[in-house]
Image (cartoon, rainbow, N blue to C red):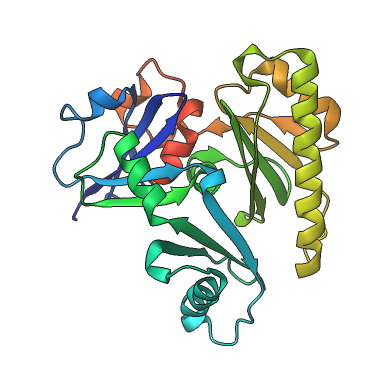
Amino acid sequence: MNRTSVVGIDCRDGRLYLARVVHGGGRPEVDSLSTLSRDEISEGCIRDGDRLILSVPDNMVLVKALHLDRTDPVALDRRVYFELGRSVLEPETEFLFDALIPEDLPLQLGLIYRRERLRDLLAECGCSGQDNVGYLVRAAALGRGYLTFCRPASGELVALVDIAPSLVSICILYRRRLVCLAHLADSAGRQATDETINKLAIECRTIVNFKLAALADVGITLPLSSVVLSGADAGERVRDVFSRRFSACVSGPEINRAFFTESTAGADVDPEQYLVALGLAVN
């Protein structure tokens, strides 16, 4: 069986978080997790044949929720791309379009990336000149990483919140399907105080509640059952504060190490910090 490797690259806080995942042997295998500088990645860290997927900061991507009927599911993605093209005022060639289409729901998420910003991001990550490159908005990568590599939290409606320096990525899952993406700026940063953490928790609750109200329009009316906090700035102290602000259960992601190779399973790394990178490396 043909085996291929995909490298997810999550650029945050001036560092690159890389996850190499090998596909083709049944379920995906996490081959390596590493944190590098831009210079280090340009020194042969990318192997011949690697497919690269870069995380795009949520504030660089326009997410449009569409409600097209599913009478012709085969052509649904083309219809989504058509609607996205109609929504931009500049030539369509200036943009890259993508779509997330959850099964059996009257909801589609259209993603609009500006190609110029993607080229800048590629250079920022030290990957200029690489040809086999793809992109995914960070919140969607968070959802894919969780769905593929984590043991599921209880309940049917789950909010994933990844707190990175200066940006919080939010992904809402309904019955293990991505149904909503959101983000907000994190002003707390690494010098967080009880006051700034509490403010962040309130802001997250507000945006999650707002998105849940919008999901009610497509028939998703269940109460939020779980909030899963991840990221460099989501330690026990932050989770305690979020627990006081959300009525749903608040916990961290439980990554299933059964996906890891023997060498990766024994590595001295915190896999939770690579959840977005792992989601990027999902086929």
Q: Is residue 269 above or below residue 66?
A: above
Q: Is residue 214 visible?
A: yes
Q: Residue at x 24, y 23 (%)?
A: 40
User: Which residue is outermost to the bottom?
Assistant: 71
Q: Is residue 224 visible?
A: no
Task: Identify the image quadrant of residue 214.
Answer: bottom right
Q: Is residue 225 above or below residue 35?
A: below
Task: Identify the image quadrant of residue 197.
Answer: top right
Is 243 placed left or right of 22 in the picture? right
Residue 60, image x, y percentages:
51, 47
Is 154 placed left or right of 42 in the picture? right
Count of all numbered marks drawn on residues in the image? 0
User: Which residue is outermost to the front?
Assistant: 90
Is 215 placed left or right of 150 in the picture? right
Q: Is residue 206 above or below residue 245?
A: below
Q: Residue at x 74, y 28 (%)?
A: 200
Residue 259, image x, y percentages:
40, 37
176 or 16: nearer the viewer: 16
Task: Identify the image quadrant of residue 139.
Answer: top right
166 or 27: nearer the viewer: 166
Quarter of the image with the N terminus in it = bottom left
Q: Residue at x 46, y 63 (%)?
A: 98
Residue 164, image x, y percentages:
56, 28
Residue 129, image x, y percentages:
19, 44
